[in-house]
Amino acid sequence: FFFKQKTAYEISACLVGSEMCIRDRLRSDRDMLFAQNTEIEENLEKVSENERVKLEITLKEKETKIEDLNRLLEGNKERETIFESQSTQNNQLLNQALKQAESIESTYKELVANLRNSLQEDKQELQQKISELDSQKNNLMNNLQTLQQEYNDLQSKFE
């Protein structure tokens, strides 16, 4: 800041030269600092009030967010409890299904073994019947040949 220097006569008839400049400068610096200090205090009050309001708003927003998060957390705890319960039930059902599958597999293996035994027995019976039928066929063929021979013999006697 620049101030116009007053003449000695404008200030006081008893001051001369450098004394006038020093006194004027000290007064003007003091007045300027006082004005700046007052302005700073007013601005600080405004800023402080604005900052306080902003901080209160921010605090309320954060409190709301915390409440929302707490609600979400409670919901998550409820879902977790439900999930754990369902997981336990699913594990029980899975164990039951595994036991049933093991039982079915055991029964299946037993049935396959019985079927194999039965088929083996049936195969042996069929092979025996085939042998018997082959034997009967051979006997019938022999009988047929014998009959044919007899027929031929009889026919030749009548001719």
Image: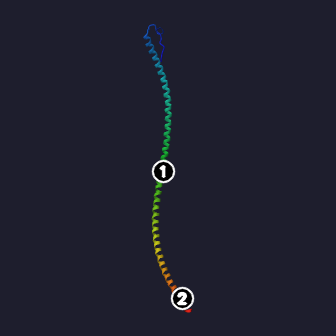
Which of 37/4 is in front? 4
Q: Is residue 90 above or below residue 136?
A: above
Q: Nearer the viewer, residue 136 or 1?
A: 136
Q: Kindly check if marks 1 and 2 are in contact, taking CB atoms under 8 A apart as contact.
A: no
Residue at image x 46%, y 16%? Answer: 28
Q: CA distance from mark 1 to mark 2?
A: 97 Å
Residue type at numbered disc 1: Phe
Q: Nearer the viewer, residue 32 or 124?
A: 124
Q: Is residue 143 above or below residue 103?
A: below
* Residue 102, percent from left and from top: 45, 62
Q: Which residue is mark 2?
A: 152
Q: Secondary structure at mark 1?
A: helix
Nearer the observer, disc 1 or disc 2? 2
In the displayed structure, 81 sits above or below 18; it is below
Residue at the extreme right of the image, as rendered: 159
Quadrant of the rendering where the C terminus is positioned = bottom right
Residue sitting farthest toward the top: 13
Point 47% across, 21% down: residue: 36
Crowd tier of the residue under label 1, counting other residues whose Cα lies within 10 Å: few below 14, some 14–19, many 20 or above: few
Residue closer to the observer: 36 or 16 = 16
Which dot marks residue 83? 1
**SS assignment at label 2:** helix
Identify the residue shown where x is 45% and y is 15%: 25
Name the amino acid, label 2.
Asn
Mark before the other along the chain sequence, 1 or 2: 1
User: Residue drawn 50% across and 36% down?
Assistant: 61
Colouring: rainbow
| Residue 124 x/y as whole percent | 46, 75
Q: Which mark is residue 42?
A: none
Position in image of residue 94 (x %, y %): 47, 57
* Residue 86 at x, y percent in the picture: 48, 53
